[in-house]
Amino acid sequence: MNWIANNYATLLIFLGLLLILLEVLVLGLSLFILLFVGLASIITGLLILLDIVPATLPVSLTVIAMLTIILAILFWHPLKKIQFNQYNEPVKGDLIGARFKLTSDISAKKPGSHHYSGVKWSVRSESFISAGTEVAIVKAEVGVLTVEVV
């Protein structure tokens, strides 16, 4: 017990680092609460080392709680924006550019079908393409291939 009392600030800093690592590595910054509590614990530990805050459990828990709330208010919205950043670039897969001959007529209103790699794909095009025409895949979505004449 004496060791904990003598190294209370170091223990808080270590606990804060542990909480941040847990949030980042295990939870992937999905909750943020452990990040805020971890940062508040590190700041509180540093304040105790600088003799700004007394090294008592009730005072340190109060400071951690207040700092957690302040950090959450300051950083919640910026972190949420970072979390939901999405890139809407089309993915170029192995199917793009693959060629095959149509077995039926297709158009924008009447899609056809094609068996490729054990999957029955719906085949569509913006224009009319007759059966027997060689086409190339220009876009692949879930279950749907968009093609153009080669």
Image (cartoon, rainbow, N blue to C red):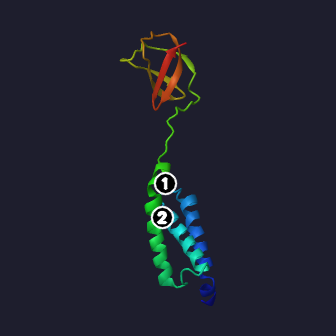
Q: Residue at x 47, y 22 (%)?
A: 146
Residue topped by disc 2: 71
Find out whether the residues at labels 1 and 2 contact each other: C-beta distance under 8 Å: no
N-term mark: 1 or 2: 2
Element type where label 2 sits in the image: helix
Is 1 drawn above or below residue 125 in the view shown?
below
Q: Quadrant of the N terminus?
A: bottom right
Q: At which x and y percent is residue 96? A: 56, 25
Q: Height in image: 56 above or below 30?
A: below
Instruction: Count how many numbered circles sit on residues in the image.
Output: 2
* x and y, in percent, of residue 71 in the image: 48, 64
Residue type at the position of mark 1: Leu
Q: Picture coordinates of residue 70 (x, y %)?
A: 45, 66
User: Residue at the location (45% across, 11% down)?
Assistant: 129
Across and down, in percent, residue 5 comes to 59, 87
Q: Which residue is mark 1?
A: 79
User: Which mark is in front, 1 or 2?
Assistant: 2
SS class, disc 1 = helix
Q: Is residue 56 visible?
A: yes
Q: Alpha-carbon neighbours of circle 2 within 10 Å: few (<14), some, or many (≥20)?
A: some
Residue appearing at x 59%, y 29% in the figure: 94
